[in-house]
């Protein structure tokens, strides 16, 4: 057996597993119809969509995407109300029922061991006429069901390769490849191997337009025009880093294939002394901003952490602290971790003034600094006045404690940080016990 066949063996659902999924899906579809009848809601069509409907789901991942299609003429309000009424009726037999929001509300529940989404949508005539983002999905379904037969195994292997290398998933936390994008790549390149071969030579701006019908210019690293909607780039959620990461792992795998790409070994949490050793050998300064993580869905939390990381870096930059690396981690606590060239700067700071020959400015500059307590020395350098003055913040900790509130933060993190935060440095960070945080540090240490 080749390596890829061995992988397939582990991830391809067995006939029994497929049968079970089919059975549960049919039951849910008929429950939707029954519920609609009971409620007197007419003309809806339930559909199974997503990987479960396309035979491109990985064994053990029990998720079912059930769409409830309403006639296009239905008003948004009616769709929202009646969609949820039907979903709630069907969910009477489910567990852990949760209302979630995309463009409009839908229900998520656990039903006979499956993770089920019940999503109301509009039955429009084509994917370019959608009224809500989810309306495209049934068209994706038709396209993939028509073009994927015979290549489902390649999709499975590719999805597992992406999962193993951290590039699968289009959520904002991952910014990688969605299931539909993966399927389209396999349709376009024909197989797992051929996709890998080509990806080794991808460059940003690559456009794949299978039907040659694209109508809009996109500025994304990868552009895959949706065969069902000429305006849309299916790869819009893919970040430049994940695009590059994928090219890199494709090359590594091509040079030396190994099972580890598909099923990476779990990383061990770093021990306290290992963390200290790492910091000492790098010789840089580690500073952590720790606060209580607000209870938010990933798609809201992670973009805000991202924004916070950027604004904190900008604040450090403004006050002369040089950042080498940064990252964030969240569970009950959220932690923004920064690695600085140094978390301490000298008391003195050079402040350049005007050229000596611009007399009115020169006068003002000298007057401002000459008698100031903050002045160490005032002199001329390269024709300019220079004042060596006392730095406002000579440690990163002091800066954060005084200026964190000036950082532009997302709504929820802004509130969380206002409630309070702690600054930890060096060995104090090594004392954080949370093992997932210590795995995060391991990944940091190894840079994946
Ligand atoms: N979808 C989409 N855009 C997204 C997410 C989902 O268009 N950002 C649509 C796709 O048509 C997708 C379907 O919704 O096939 C279901 O989404 P999801 O369950 O996330 O993906 P699957 O394709 O089912 O893949 P997986 O095997 O990971 O479940
Ligand atoms: Mg799915």
Image (spheres, rainbow, N blue to C red):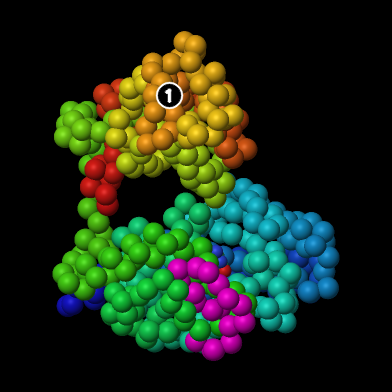
Q: Is residue 242 visible in this depiction of the protein?
A: yes
Asked if residue 113 lies in the magenta stretch, the reply is no
Q: Residues within 10 Å of mark 1 (few under 14, many from 20)?
A: many
Horizontal arrangement in the rendering, residue 221 relative to residue 122 (left or right):
left
Residue drawn at x 48%, y 15% is 370
Is 347 rendered above or below residue 227? above
Residue drawn at x 58%, y 53% is 109
Asked if residue 225 lies in the magenta stretch, the reply is yes
Residue 176, x across and y down, in percent: 43, 62
Mark 1 element type: strand
Is 413 rendered above or below residue 266? above
Residue drawn at x 82%, y 59% is 77
Give the magenta part as a residue range: 210-226
Task: Return the residue at label 1.
Answer: 387
Residue drawn at x 47%, y 43% is 310
Residue 129, x across and y down, in percent: 72, 77
């Amino acid at each position: 057996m080749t390596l890829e066949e061995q992988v397939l063996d582990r991830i391809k659902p067995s006939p029994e597993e497929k049968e079970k999924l089919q059975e549960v899906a049919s039951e849910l579809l008929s429950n939707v119809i029954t519920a609609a009848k009971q409620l007197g809601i007419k003309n809806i069509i339930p559909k199974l969509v997503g990987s479960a409907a396309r035979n491109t789901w990985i064994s053990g991942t029990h998720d079912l995407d059930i769409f409830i299609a309403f006639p296009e003429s239905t008003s948004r309000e009616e769709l929202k109300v009646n969609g949820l009424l039907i979903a709630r009726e069907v969910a009477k037999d489910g567990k852990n029922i949760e209302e979630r929001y995309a463009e409009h509300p839908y229900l998520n529940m656990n039903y006979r061991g499956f993770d089920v989404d019940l999503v109301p949508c509009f039955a429009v005539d084509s994917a370019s006429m959608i009224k809500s983002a989810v309306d495209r999905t049934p068209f994706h379904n038709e396209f993939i069901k028509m073009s994927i037969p015979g290549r489902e195994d390649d999709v499975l292997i590719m999805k597992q390769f992406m999962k193993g290398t951290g590039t699968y998933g289009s959520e904002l936390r991952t910014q990688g490849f969605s299931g539909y994008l993966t399927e389209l790549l396999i349709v376009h390149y024909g197989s797992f191997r051929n996709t890998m071969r080509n990806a080794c030579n991808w460059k940003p701006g690559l456009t794949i337009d299978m039907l040659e019908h694209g109508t809009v210019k996109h500025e994304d690293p990868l552009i895959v025009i949706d065969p069902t909607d000429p305006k849309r780039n299916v790869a819009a959620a893919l970040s430049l880093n994940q695009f590059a990461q994928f090219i890199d792992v494709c090359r590594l795998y091509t040079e030396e294939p190994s099972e580890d790409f598909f099923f990476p070994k779990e990383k061990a949490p770093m021990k306290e002394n290992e963390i200290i050793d790492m910091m000492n050998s790098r010789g840089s300064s580690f500073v952590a901003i720790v606060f209580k993580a607000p209870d938010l869905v990933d798609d809201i939390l992670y973009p805000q952490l991202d924004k916070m990381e950027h604004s904190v870096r900008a604040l450090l930059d403004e006050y002369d602290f040089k950042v080498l690396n940064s990252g964030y981690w969240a569970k009950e606590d959220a932690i923004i971790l920064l690695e600085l060239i140094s978390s301490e700067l000298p008391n003195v700071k050079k402040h350049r003034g005007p050229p000596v020959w611009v007399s009115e400015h020169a006068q003002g500059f000298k007057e401002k600094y000459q008698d100031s307590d903050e002045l160490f020395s005032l002199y001329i350098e390269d024709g300019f006045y220079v004042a060596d003055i006392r730095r406002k913040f000579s440690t990163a900790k002091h800066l954060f404690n005084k200026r964190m509130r000036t950082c532009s933060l997302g709504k929820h993190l802004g509130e969380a940080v206002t409630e309070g935060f702690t600054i930890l440095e060096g060995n104090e960070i090594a004392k954080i016990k949370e093992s997932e945080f210590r795995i995060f540090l391991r990944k940091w240490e190894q840079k994946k």
